[in-house]
Amino acid sequence: MLNVTNINVYYGNIHALHDMTFHVDDGEIVSLIGANGAGKSTTLKTISGLLRSHTGDIEFDGHSISRTEPDIIVRQGLTHVPEGRRIFLSMTVEENLDMGAFTIKEGKKKALDEVFDRFPRLAERRNQIAGTLSGGEQQMLAMGRALMIRPKMMMLDEPSMGLAPILVSQIMDIVVELNKAGTTILLVEQNARMALRISHRSYVIESGRIVLSDTSENLLNNEQVKKAYLGG
Ligand SMILES: Nc1ncnc2c1ncn2[C@@H]1O[C@H](COP(=O)(O)OP(=O)(O)OP(=O)(O)O)[C@@H](O)[C@H]1O
Ligand SMILES: [Mg+2]
């Protein structure tokens, strides 16, 4: 579904991503694990077209998207739930979801109903101003907004950030459900244990380079990973 081949990304003269190559198959949950500043968000931003690689290629669903505008990438079925959620705080829940549907003309109502079915909490609060939602509800809204176009693939940047443990597991359960319903997932997490538990495969990123890649099961038992990311 997604093939990232040899990308190099710079912020001015800071070389943030080095020769990164990885892939996500149709139907998988793949996670990217790494410390603060490793380059996880940069990777997602590059895939979604917000940053550009100087080299290589990014292919989604059989088409190169490395020169495609971000809104067209969304139209092709790849959505990005950014770090920090970036919902419209002064708009209502329903207005936020409506913004997520900018690429669709028909079936908006149906998409909205599907999102409300998946997140009953959002349905109850459809007219509430998004800025007054709790952290977990805001995360649900950000995910719901990305689901409005019924994406083939969703990229989630630290969905567990700032959430209480019980909400973290709820959000992770939702990610698994979405995947079972057919959405391919690329998950970025600092909560490595959680990410490894729910993903099929993972890549470990250090200083903008992929240093390890394996099934999540193997990585959970990898001494190096245990020491660096799972607290021993
Ligand atoms: N706009 C920017 N300008 C300059 N450097 C940047 C910019 N954004 C990120 N960087 C640098 O690029 C590197 C990778 O950052 P990135 O945000 O991708 O890390 P991350 O793995 O997502 O970290 P975190 O877990 O803290 O979110 C860091 O060294 C960061 O300081
Ligand atoms: Mg980040």
Image (cartoon, rainbow, N blue to C red):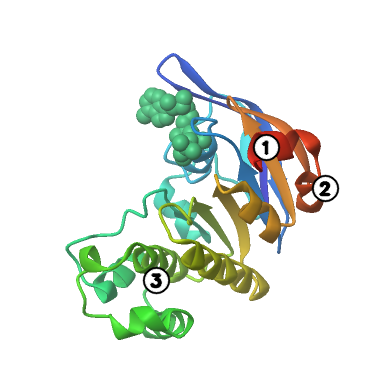
Please determine whether, in this image, residue 32 is positioned above or below residue 173. Answer: above
Q: Are marks 1 and 3 in contact (CB under 8 Å)?
A: no
The residue pinned by badge 2 equals 218
Q: Name the residue located 67 percent from the left edge and 73 percent from the top edge.
A: 180
The answer to whether residue 155 is seen in the rendering is yes
The residue pinned by badge 3 equals 104
User: Of residues 101 and 45, which is closer to you in this image?
Assistant: 45
Q: Position of residue 42 (x, y in %)?
A: 49, 35
Disc 2 versus disc 3: distance between alpha carbons? 41 Å
Q: Position of residue 208 (x, y in %)?
A: 58, 27
Q: Are marks 2 and 3 in contact (CB under 8 Å)?
A: no
User: Of residues 226 and 31, which is closer to you in this image?
Assistant: 226
Of tags 2 and 3, the one toward the viewer is 2
Please determine whether, in this image, residue 117 is positioned above or below residue 132. Answer: below
Q: Quadrant of the N terminus?
A: bottom right
Structural crowding at the residue carrying mark 2, measured as other residues with C-alpha within 10 Å and reported as few (<14), some (14–19) or many (≥20): some
Disc 1 versus disc 3: distance between alpha carbons? 36 Å
Structural crowding at the residue carrying mark 1, measured as other residues with C-alpha within 10 Å and reported as few (<14), some (14–19) or many (≥20): many
| Residue type of the residue flagged with mark 1 | Val
The residue pinned by badge 1 equals 204
Local SS, label 1: strand
| Residue type of the residue flagged with mark 3 | Ile
Local SS, label 3: loop
State which tag comes first along the sequence, 2 or 3. Answer: 3
State which tag comes first along the sequence, 2 or 1. Answer: 1
Q: Quadrant of residue 123?
A: bottom left
User: Of residues 193 and 158, which is closer to you in this image?
Assistant: 193
